[in-house]
Image (spheres, rainbow, N blue to C red):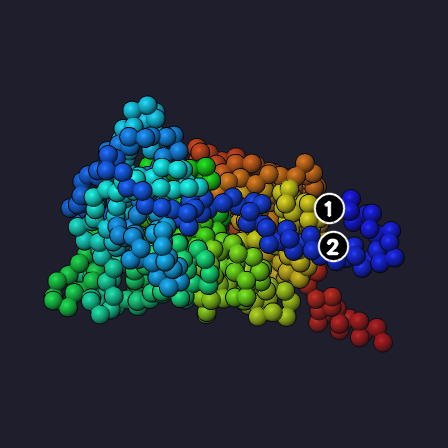
Amino acid sequence: MFLVILIISDTGFGAMRVFMTLLMVFWALVSLEGVISHGVQPLSRIAIHKTVFAIDNDAYIKASPSVLGNKEQNKEWVTLEYSNPRPSNDDWIGVFSPANFSSSTCLPENPRVGPPFLCSAPIKYQFANYTTWKYKNTGKGVLRFQLINQRSDFSFGLFSGGVSNPKLVALSNTVAFANPNAPVYPRLAQGKTWNEMTVTWTSGYGISEAEPFVEWGPKGEEQKRSPAATLTFNRKSMCGSPARTVGWRDPGFIHTGFLKELWPNSVYTYKLGHKLFNGTYIWTQTYQFKASPYPGQNSLQRVVIFGDMGKDEYDGSNEYNNFQRGSLNTSKQLINDLKNIDIVFHIGDICYANGYVSQWDQFTSQIEPIASSVPYMIASGNHERDWPDTGSFYGNMDSGGECGVLAETMFFVPAENRAKFWYSTDYGMFRFCIADTEHDWREGSEQYIFIEHCLASVDRQKQPWLIFLAHRVLGYSSTAYYTNLGSFSEPMGRDDLQKLWQKYKVDIAMYGHVHSYERTCPVYQNICTSKERKFYKRSLNGTIHVVAGGGGASLSEFSTIQPNWSIYRDFDYGFVKLTAFDHSNLLFEYKKSRDGKVYDSFRISRDYRDILACTVDSCPSMNMASSLAYRGRF
């Protein structure tokens, strides 16, 4: 493309044509970004529109057990036995829920007037020879799927023709959980005040069937009940396909309880309940969490941050087998170290459902051991929000038609308006300012005003650790994609924001979007403000920028160019952990997901006066004392 630009620049209209060509190239890159760096949603590989029903009476597929969750568990393994008299290595088995996926389920948004009669994608799939390598020779196989409670029954279809020309040759018996409506997958989040915790969960009970509530209280003491709010959405809430067509699945009901007036750092227990109108109670198990410290409270505080984790399947389902290999490892490391974690930030690209609604249940199931125990705060990414003509800053189709609805409903954040996914939250000695890169952040925008207020309003004597979080890289990244753009960040990313980071002395700015790890020196306007790499004393004089997008999705290549400000890069899966020991000492650690070991780290040690000290562009050019001295000269 650039060779063409050089050639046409010699014509009479060269300058204008160069500009227009560059503009077209830029927006092409932006619109294709999801394809370039984020892989393909594996369920989208199935050509649903080509599917035909070709039932073979000599083929079969049997599932057992047929009733799941008899001990009130929300996940269970199902064993399939199957046979195809004309086997092939591209035969596959799809898991469908609801179990009935015939033409009667085709709605006006996705009409079928004749064959094919398949109107919805499976919730996951696996090839028939996955665990039976002789399948092509024998036509017989055995396969195990792990199912989670998703408010409906399940069936399994055996398909020939591969995923590009699917032909349904056999359909299994129906499998269902004993109570498909049961409350599941609690996820904690900080409330709008420091002493409020929210808990969100999913169930099949609408407000016309049952009253949702949380029973909670200090551990070992009397418990009380708080009512929960209930939200849901329908197919018409989606902005496009596949979310509105083959990817649609009823999301059930999302409930949120608000636990208020908590004592700082105290341990509370809770369980979720639904009171049916016949007087019956439905309960979950009992969980526990530790309340947040008071803003400024001097105690040990540990924070985990990463982006772009996505989800994977314990049963090896093909759905994400080659796309998000690190996701389970990241989850396992956090679960194993949960006693040493106080709060988690997942900064965008949450589960990569990309319009396949069933994936949100599977993601919340995967993170349940984490999110039910510590606040699980999220940020909005391109795969949650972006869709043309819906108000997103980028006009691509990365959300698969979700346009933010799923993320904004499935998770609570203390934003004034969850459709505008920027917010602040305090955790003891930390102030976190979370931006929404899928909405305009430039100077003069509503979000820019919020960002400046968030940074300016913190009392650094009480909360010395000021952290800026966002999904897309607004600061610095030497990944191949950003290097090729020539900006080393989102175009326009730091044009307006860097003066805020510098003015308010942001310690660390952290991003996802790029699926790897990178740390900069303290930097301002592309120049390192410190030669130190491991132990920072006194003022940083700039902001350390960190890309922590290696949570689980397929890795992003670095450029062969490593700028001077880039001091550590890692092409691997991992996450960041911040530990505040007190008001003067902070430890930063980068850990790999495969072993949980520390591969990069640094410390900051300083006093409050170091934060007050002026650096380049961080103080007014003239204060009162200097003004009086200046006047005294005349």
Q: Amino acid at mark 1?
A: Met
| Label 1 secondary element | loop
Q: In the image, which disc is placed on residue 1?
A: 1
Residue visible at 84% across and 52% down?
9
Residue visible at 22% across and 70% down?
208
Quarter assignment of residue 283 = bottom left
Residue closest to the eye, 151 or 407: 151
Quarter assignment of residue 505 = bottom right
Where residue 264 appears, as percent x and y from the top left, is 35, 59
Check if mark 2's residue and mark 1's residue have beta carbons within 8 Å.
Answer: yes
Q: In the image, which disc is placed on residue 21?
A: 2
Relative horizontal placement of residue 443, taking residue 433 as reference (left or right): right
| Label 2 secondary element | helix
Residue visible at 27% across and 38% down?
56
Residue 516 in view here:
no
Where residue 362 appears, as percent x and y from the top left, is 34, 48
Q: Amino acid at mark 2?
A: Thr
Residue 626 in view here:
yes
